[in-house]
Image (cartoon, grey):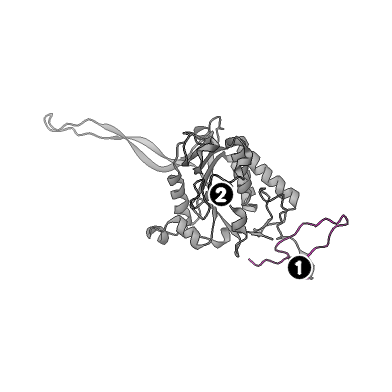
Amino acid sequence: MPNFEMPMPKSETGAEPPVLAGVRENPDGSPDYSRAVEYRPRGRNSSSINTQVETGGSSENLTEREKSRERAAEIVLEDGGVRVHMSVAKSLSLSPYGSDGFQNLETRIQDHRQPNVVIEEITMQFLSRDEFMRNIRLDNALNDRDIKEIIDIRPEVRPTYETVTVPGKKGVLGFGKMPDRTERKATGRYESILHSEIVSGGKNEPVVRFTYYIPQTEWRDYSGRQGQMMVVEIVLPESAAKELEQILKRDPAAMRQIVEEVMKKRFLEDPGDWEKSQGYGDSLRPPYEVWDAEPNGGRIYLQTAGKEPGFHEDRVYKVKQY
C-alpha cells in the first residue's frame, strides 16, 4: 500500500500537530484524510509507541485511538479468561511451579489446552492446503512473509452426538443371539461452547477465542538465548468478542496494549518488570520497536475462522515508525 506523508504546520502554541500517515489527494487537489491513521508516542516503553498503522480504514485522532485501545484492554480484563505461554524466569514469581522456562500463565481460564493445539489451529487457517500437505511449519511460513505477529479469531464449537440403537441378532434355535445395543454417533453438526464452561465466573454465552502468536525470533529469554516466543489466548463471551473484534480489525496493534495490561495487572507483582531485562536476556515486552523499524515495518496478520485457508495479503497490517 503506498504511503505518503504531508508536513503540517505547528499549532499556535508551538506544539507539533498529529502526524497523519497515508494522506492522499482528492480530485480537486485538497488533502484526503479518510485513510490516514496516526499515533503519538507516550514514551519508548509505552503501548502507544511512535508508530503508524496502514489499515486502509477511516482515520482516528489520537484521543479516539487511545480510548479504543483502553477499551480493548478493559474488555479483556473484565470478561476474559487468559493464558500466556512464554519463557519466564522464576525470580519474577510468575511460574505456577516456581521454575524457569516455557510455561503457561493463566487467569480464570480453565480448559487445560496446550499451546501446540492452538498453534495447530492457526496453522490450518494460515497455510494453503498445498502448504499444509507439504508439512510447512507455521513459523517458517510467517518468516517467509516477514510477519512477526499473528492474531487468530474463532468461535469455540464442539461436535454433537446422538444415541442410536443398533439392532441385535435373533439367532437360530437360541444360538448366536445378540441383544440390541446403543452407541453414540456423530450428527455432523456442531454446538457452541459456553463462556462459563471455560472461564471461572464466565457468562452463559457462546465463547470466542482470540489467539495472539509471536513465533520464535531473535528475541532473547532470561537465559540470553534467542528463541523467545509468546502465545496469548483470550476467551470472551460472544457479546464482548464482537466489540473487541471490531477494534482489532481497525487497529490490530491494540493487541499489544491488551497483552501489556494483562501482564501488568494480572500476572506481574511489579508492573515495571514488563519493560526490564530478564536475567541475561531481553524484557518480557516484545521488541516491537525493532520490528517496526525494519524496512517493511512490522507486519501483523489478522485471520478469522471460516475463511478460505491460506495467506491473504489484504489481511496484513503494516506498523511503521516515523
**Residue beneath label 1, please?**
26
Mark positioned earlier in the residue sequence (2 or 1): 1
Residue found at the far front of this picture: 280
Above or below for 316 versus 2: above
How many marks do you count on the picture? 2
Q: Where is residue 23 in the image (x, y as percent from the top left)?
A: 73, 64
Quarter of the image where one finds residue 137: bottom left
| The N terminus - image quarter | bottom right
The crowding category of the residue bearing disc 1, from other C-alpha atoms within 10 Å (few below 14, some 14 to 19, many at least 20), is: few
- Is 148 left, or right, of 163 in this rendering? right
Image point (69%, 55%), residue name: 50
Q: Where is residue 144 in the image (x, y as percent from the top left)?
A: 49, 62
Q: Is residue 226 above or below residue 274?
A: below
Q: Is residue 26 magenta?
A: yes
Figure check: 1 above or below 211: below
What secondary structure prevails in the magenta region?
loop
Image point 60% across, 41% down: which residue?
273
Which residue: 65% across, 67% down? Answer: 2
Q: 243 left or right of 15?
A: left
**x then y, percent, for residue 29:** 79, 70
Q: Name the amino acid type tagged 1.
A: Asn
Viewer-nearest residue: 226 or 80 = 226
Q: For mark 2, give the secondary structure.
A: loop
Judging by the rendered image, the residue that carries numbered circle 2 is 282
Disc sitting over residue 191 in the figure: none
Left or right: where does residue 300 sit relative to residue 171? right
Residue numbers of the magenta segment: 1-27
Going by the numbered disc 2, the residue's amino acid type is: Asp
